[in-house]
Image (cartoon, grey):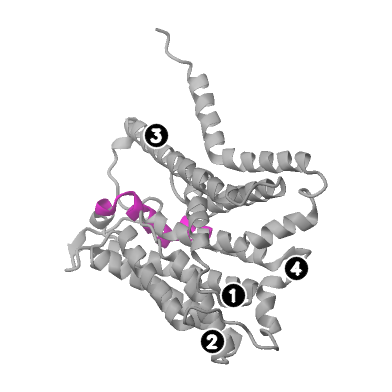
Amino acid sequence: MTPPSPHRSLLDHLRGHVIGTYGLLALTALLFLYFSLTLPDTFPTRDNVSSILSNQSIPAVLALGATIPIAIGKFDLSIGYGLGLAHVVVMYLVVEAGRPWPLACLTVVVGGALVGALNGVVVEFARIDSLIATLGTGSIMYAFTGWLTDGSRIVPGPDGLPAGFTGLYDSRFLGLPVPAYYVLALTVALWVVLERLPLGRYFYVIGSNPRAAGMLGIPTRRYSVYAFAGSGLVVGCAGILLAAQQQIGNPSVGLDYLLPAFVGALLGSTTIRPGRVNAVGTLVAVTLLAVGLAGIGQLGADFWATPLFNGCTLLVAVGLAGYASRRRLRSGLTAAGRPDAGQPDTGPPNTGRPVAAPRNDGDGDGAAT
């Protein structure tokens, strides 16, 4: 049998790489084009684009928050409950306690980070699976939300909320809603952390192989707590944005955002950097979901079409994410067969320096000496 041409193999590899990296982005563009041709009077308009950017800003922020623990191979199911609690606390501090809104926002952001860190401690030091642990802590958050509001809504007085606070969501800049810029800024910040800083590289190493990360001297428990704290901080920001949008404190809101957040994060792991979650991929996935939901809504779909769309997309996202991870692993194994693949590793990928041998510091982690 004639072996395949090396040029053809290279072409197939490049084609597969391009499709895997940019396929979801191309699908988003095609979906937008389809709805624009189908609904030329309503869909490709500036008002509709602004509405999509504004309405999907909170799911996008929450999806970026969910991305951080997934990078270390954990899941934070408390983010939906945390979103509900954060927006209720903001409203309580501003309306009931009469605190200045900047102080209330700062309190919620710091509190979100602390609650996230507590999630990390429960997962890592109590040795409870992240799905179970965060489901339990999320239920506690929901109970605290009910206790704080007594099951009723927090409604502002006749004077309403401060204009500066509502402006966090209602303002516009260069003709576009300000929340779109929040999402873009958070995406850039998270991309820098995950792709350019040692912190993000350690997250990926831990998510790929926690045991190997410990042997390389990475304190896995500590960085896991950092990941959950980062997720909680982002959830706090999303809660502030939700309060500025809703302008009431509703104890039952929050869980509706949980599924879209995980769909965006998991689907995002199949693009840009296939096989691992990444900030830009999450943004692309959220954009695809936003375009799809807006299109089927304008086509007159029934109310059940949204959860059906989200559920089916989640299943597809999980399947594609698993396939991308297996393909990435196979590529690594293939590369290991090359003559230069037998060189020993001296540290985590792209750290630029060797890592000292681990020592036992009493908490089960490897720590560099």
Q: Is residue 168 above or below residue 39?
A: below
Q: Which residue is mark 2?
A: 93
2 or 4: mark nearer the eye: 2
- Secondary structure beneath disc 1? helix
Q: CA distance from mark 3 to mark 2?
A: 53 Å
Secondary structure of residue under mark 3: helix
Residue drawn at (52%, 52%) of the image: 264
Asked whether the residues under the numbered discs 1 and 4 touch, taking CB atoms below 8 Å apart as contact, a structural biologist would say no
Q: Earlier in the sequence, mark 3 or mark 2?
A: 2
Q: What percent of the width, then of the height, locates residue 70?
A: 41, 55
205 magenta-colored? yes
What main secondary structure does the magenta stretch of the protein show? helix
**Is-magenta flag for residue 19?**
no
Mark 4, residue position: 173
Q: Pointer 3: what residue?
A: 331
Is 50 placed left or right of 136 in the picture?
right
Is residue 133 visible in the rendered image? The answer is yes
